[in-house]
């Protein structure tokens, strides 16, 4: 069994594992003794119901478990440290706004008084429609107009704890005005800009360069306005956000310390602060490296909670202040693990060719030399042969460009070159690692097959394209077989950026993904894991590939599962209407054109019928490749 090709034991977090049959199994973290669910079996059952891949699969057990462990880890840290305040988490809706996700978070978070964070009017409308516990916080960040503020103030009449977090001094004047008009006193927070910077992808927009929050001078100004307006008691929360996916524990500690110091000083000015909101940033170990590299984290959830609670407690004790209620806005850490994108490989383009290329009379001497390399290949001259092959191939390409070589001859040269590469790779497999030079290894690894896959990077994994995010990607079957190919993945968009060429593997990150040769009698499925945060709403319609089918399942005992909800992906007709085409009108125009063809080009009526029905069917179809 080839367990660790993909480092699953490192990043799988006990949720993903390999079954004895070589398939991927999903383990229920709520009932670890339950039999895992075979993911390939899930795809089969979904297909029987007419739900094709690509499909975004959400696992409700994973989400429930994350909400539980985040809350319980904070509660445990509070006990261990002897902290006298509470923890109140909120989920930032922007991280995954999908109705089924937010509803479940509200449900699973209810016993923990888990609340919601919103950054816009639309998100506030979502939050106000949820059944959150009355003790839970609704935190309003983002720029607010009077309508936003009005809604937030009125929600207190529903018994909700809605905190309006000031993003600017100007906003305070508007809040005071609307609150007086409605006769509803506000519950306020202030967003402060801290000076600590963070490493990782959001480094450039953290600290002084952060776009959000009030500077120290503005915080003092706000406090003075509140004092003048007799509203100092309304200021109950201090908010700051370090950045997302913070990889390094030391940075989190320093940030919590700075935030605590500021909290103490604002309180000393007379504000009634009760909640210390430390924003998001709790990361996910996508690579399982447990390091401070951008797609990993060098701490555990328990360590995060303990460090935050201890740091805040220490600063408060030092200043002789009561322990505030700690709030975090962890988004990624709540939802990333609960979704995965499942897709099939449509075909592969092999980098090397097995076919023997024979020299022909009159062949160019460079081509003859390239062909002869195969015969002279030995374990001692692998790098030398690769150098020669590359040189001959490049010279032959140059001759082609100058018009001195025909296309069929160049094709033979390319095949001869690929053949020698294949032979080098086969020899390397039979040798010990120590017998290759690192250069040879890197060059051969870099020559990868292309596996063409049925998904859109821009729609389903936008952060992979935009910020080089890494998601573990693995085959869902044949994990008891050693992968025999190295591949990069291409999606179905016709964009050269629609490609993945960085992967999580056993010993870190690699340019190629080890995969199995395709078997034409069997579908080969891959899964991209931990895609529940940010990916669903940032995706776009590149090449008009729309939303995928989305399914939520509940893992049950004995390896079974229950389908909780199913949302059909976009049809072609739907994506066309997003870009302002009216499908009905398109069909009419097409029909008119087809009728003209009957008149002008002698197409038969049968052909006309076929054309129109194919067009109509295509409008109803899934935007992705549909297997017959
Ligand atoms: C204000 C605020 N809170 C919370 C978050 C969520 O951060 P994360 O997903 O890293 O927990 C963000 C996202 O960047 C944010 O801007």
Image (spheres, rainbow, N blue to C red):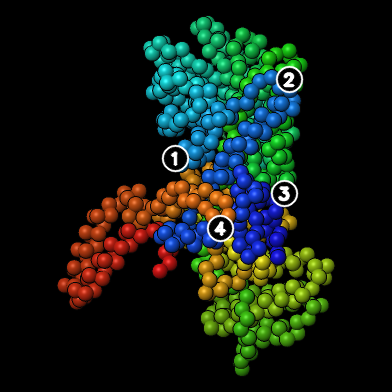
User: In the drawing, what numbered circle is on residue 215?
Assistant: none
SS under mark 3: loop
The residue at the point 73 percent across, 45 percent down is: 291
Q: Estimate the spatial distance between the alpha carbons at disc 3 and disc 2, rounded to whole Å.
A: 32 Å
From the image, tell me which residue sits under label 2. Answer: 315
Q: Estimate the spatial distance between the alpha carbons at disc 1 and disc 3, rounded to whole Å.
A: 33 Å
Q: Estimate the spatial distance between the alpha carbons at disc 4 and disc 3, rounded to whole Å.
A: 25 Å
Mark 4 or 3, nearer chain start = 4
Q: Given this view, does label 4 or label 1 mark the residue nearer the observer?
A: 4
User: In the drawing, what numbered circle is on residue 289?
Assistant: 3
The residue at the point 75 percent across, 85 percent down is: 376
| Picture quarter with ligand 1 | top right
Q: Is residue 285 left or right of residue 101?
A: right
From the image, tell me which residue sits under label 4. Answer: 39
SS under mark 1: helix
Q: Is residue 394 left or right of residue 49?
A: right
Task: Farthest residue to the bottom: give it.
Answer: 361
The residue at the point 56 percent across, 78 percent down is: 400
């Amino acid at each position: 069994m080839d367990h660790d090709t993909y480092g699953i034991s490192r990043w799988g977090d006990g949720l993903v594992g390999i079954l004895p049959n070589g398939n991927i199994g999903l383990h229920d973290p709520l009932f670890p003794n339950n039999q895992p669910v075979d993911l390939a079996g899930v795809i089969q059952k979904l297909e029987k119901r007419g739900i094709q891949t690509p499909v975004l699969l959400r696992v409700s057990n994973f989400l429930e478990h994350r909400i539980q462990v985040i809350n319980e880890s904070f509660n445990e840290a509070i006990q261990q440290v002897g902290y006298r305040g509470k923890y109140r988490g909120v989920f930032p809706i922007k991280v995954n706004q999908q109705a089924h996700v937010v509803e479940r978070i509200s449900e699973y978070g209810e016993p923990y008084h888990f609340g919601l964070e919103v950054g816009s009017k639309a998100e506030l409308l979502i939050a106000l429609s949820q059944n959150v516990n009355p003790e839970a916080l609704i935190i309003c960040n983002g720029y607010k107009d009077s309508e936003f503020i009005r809604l937030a103030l009125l929600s207190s009449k529903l018994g909700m704890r809605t905190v309006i977090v000031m993003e600017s001094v100007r906003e305070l004047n508007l809040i005071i005005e609307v609150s007086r008009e409605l006769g509803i006193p506000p519950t306020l927070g202030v967003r402060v800009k801290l000076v600590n910077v963070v490493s990782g992808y959001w480094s450039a927009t953290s600290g002084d360069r952060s776009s959000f929050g009030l500077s120290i001078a503005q915080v003092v100004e706000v406090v003075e306005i509140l004092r003048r307006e007799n509203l100092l008691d309304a200021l109950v929360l201090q908010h700051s956000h370090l950045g997302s996916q913070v990889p390094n524990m030391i940075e989190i500690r320093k940030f919590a310390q700075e935030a605590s110091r500021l909290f103490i000083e604002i309180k000393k000015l007379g504000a009634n602060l009760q909640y210390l909101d430390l924003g998001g940033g709790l990361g996910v170990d996508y690579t399982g490296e447990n390091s401070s590299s951008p797609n990993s984290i060098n701490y555990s959830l328990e360590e995060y909670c303990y460090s935050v609670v201890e740091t805040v407690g220490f600063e408060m004790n030092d200043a002789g202040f009561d322990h505030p209620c700690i709030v975090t806005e962890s988004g990624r850490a709540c939802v990333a693990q609960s979704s995965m994108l499942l897709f099939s490989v449509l075909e592969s383009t092999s980098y090397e060719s097995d076919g023997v290329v024979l020299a022909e009379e009159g062949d160019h001497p460079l081509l003859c030399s390239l062909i002869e390399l195969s015969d002279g290949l030995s374990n001692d001259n692998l790098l030398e042969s690769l150098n020669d092959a590359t040189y001959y191939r490049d010279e032959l390409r140059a001759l082609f460009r100058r018009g001195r070589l025909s296309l069929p001859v160049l094709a033979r040269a390319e095949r001869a070159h690929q053949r020698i590469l294949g032979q080098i790779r086969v020899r390397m497999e039979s040798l010990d690692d120590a017998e290759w030079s690192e250069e040879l290894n890197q060059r051969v690894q870099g020559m990868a097959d292309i596996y063409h896959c049925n998904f859109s990077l821009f729609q389903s994994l936008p952060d992979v394209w935009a910020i080089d995010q890494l998601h573990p990607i693995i085959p869902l079957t044949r994990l008891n077989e050693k992968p025999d190919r190295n591949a990069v993945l291409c999606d179905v968009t016709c964009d050269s950026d629609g490609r993945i060429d960085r992967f999580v593997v056993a010993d870190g990150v690699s340019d190629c993904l080890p995969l199995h040769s395709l078997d034409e009698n069997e579908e080969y499925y891959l899964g991209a894991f931990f895609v529940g945060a940010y990916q669903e709403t940032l995706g776009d319609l590149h090449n008009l590939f729309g939303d995928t089918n989305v399914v939520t399942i509940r893992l049950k005992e004995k390896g079974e599962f229950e389908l909780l909800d199913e949302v059909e992906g976009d049809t072609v007709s739907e994506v066309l209407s997003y870009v302002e085409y009216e499908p009905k009108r398109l069909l009419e125009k097409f029909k008119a054109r087809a009728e003209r063809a009957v008149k002008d080009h002698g197409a038969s009526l049968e052909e006309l019928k076929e054309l129109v029905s194919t067009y109509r069917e295509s409008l109803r179809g899934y935007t992705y490749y549909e297997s017959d």
